[in-house]
Amino acid sequence: ANIGLFSKLEGNNSIESQGMQMDVVISAKTEGEILVDTKSSLVKKRSSVMDLSGSIEVMGQSVPITSKAIVNIDYF
C-alpha cells in the first residue's frame, strides 16, 4: 500500500547574538510517500522531498535561505 505524505511548516523567530537582533522567517513544504507491506504491516520504503525557503534579517539587511532535502530510506 502507498501512503501519501504532505506537510507544511511556517515559522519565525527573533534571536539575539553578540548584541545584534536577527529575525528569521522560514517556510517549508514536504511531499513524499510511504510504502507498506500489507501482509506484514511493516514499512518497506519511505521517500520524501523537502523545499525550504526563508530569510534572516540582521541590521536592516536580509539574507535569503534556500534548501532542498531528498530522503530515500529502504527497510530490509
Image (cartoon, rainbow, N blue to C red):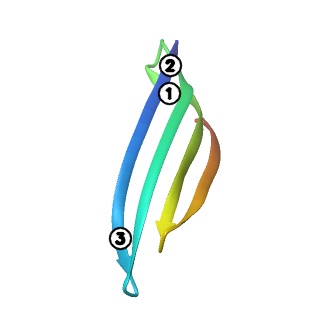
**Which secondary structure lies at badge 1?**
strand
**Mark 2: few/some/many CA within 10 Å (<14, 14-19, 20+):** few
* Residue drawn at the location 43% of the way across and 34% of the way down: 8
Quadrant of residue 61 in the image? bottom right
Gap in Å between the C-alphas at discs 3 and 2? 35 Å
> Residue 66 at x, y = what percent?
62, 51
Q: Is residue 13 above or below residue 66?
A: below
Quadrant of residue 18 in the image? bottom left
* Residue drawn at the location 59% of the way across and 56% of the way down: 65
Gap in Å between the C-alphas at discs 1 and 3? 39 Å
Residue 15 is marked as: 3
**Mark 3: few/some/many CA within 10 Å (<14, 14-19, 20+):** few
Name the quarter where the C terminus is drawn.
top right
> Residue 64 at x, y = what percent?
60, 57
For disc 1, the marked residue is 43
For disc 2, the marked residue is 4
* Closer to the eye: label 3 or 2: 3
Q: Which amino acid, mark 1?
A: Val
